[in-house]
Amino acid sequence: MTRKQVKKNNKRGFKGSYILAAAALILAWYLAVSFIHTGIQIHNKEKELEEVSLQVEAQQEENAKLQAVIDGDQGDYMEKIAREELGYGKLGEKFFYNVTPGANG
């Protein structure tokens, strides 16, 4: 090969290598953006999982309380409801009410 032919072949090689370098740069950018986006999604899903786990835990506690009422003496539960929510008391029991203005909030 002559010197001219070598230079001509080198010019073609440079043009191809620029395209290859640009393609590699675009691929690297795409992979970086995809990686960051996936990381953000993972973080959001982990937060969502934590919230749902807390809800499950709270519901399990509520279920345990209700199961204890079902399994236990329901008379105690009924007495508690009668006293706290309905304002009833036992026979002969005395109630005292604070009638001082502003004392009950």
Image (tube, rainbow, N blue to C red):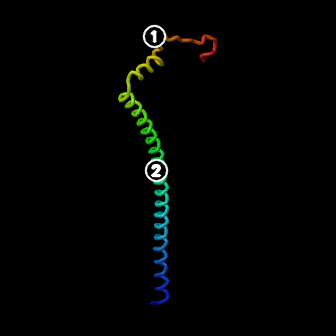
Q: Residue 74: x, y in percent?
A: 38, 23
Q: Residue 33: x, y in percent?
A: 49, 57
Q: Amino acid at mark 2?
A: Gln
Task: Decide: is 87 above or below 4.
Answer: above
Write the residue at 39% across / 21% down: 75
Q: CA distance from mark 1 to mark 2?
A: 63 Å
Q: Earlier in the sequence, mark 1 or mark 2?
A: 2
Q: Which residue is under mark 1?
A: 91
Q: Amino acid at mark 1?
A: Leu
Mark 2: which secondary structure? helix
Quadrant of the rendering where the C terminus is positioned: top right
Task: Decide: is 15 above or below 98.
Answer: below
Quadrant of the rendering where the N terminus is positioned: bottom left
Residue 41: give its label: 2
Closest to the camera, between mark 1 and mark 2, is 1
Task: Decide: is 42 above or below 76.
Answer: below
> Do the CB atoms of the residues marked 1 and 2 lie less than 8 Å apart?
no
Specify the farthest residue to the bottom. Answer: 2
Residue 19: give its label: none
Between 6 and 30, the one nearer to me in the picture: 30
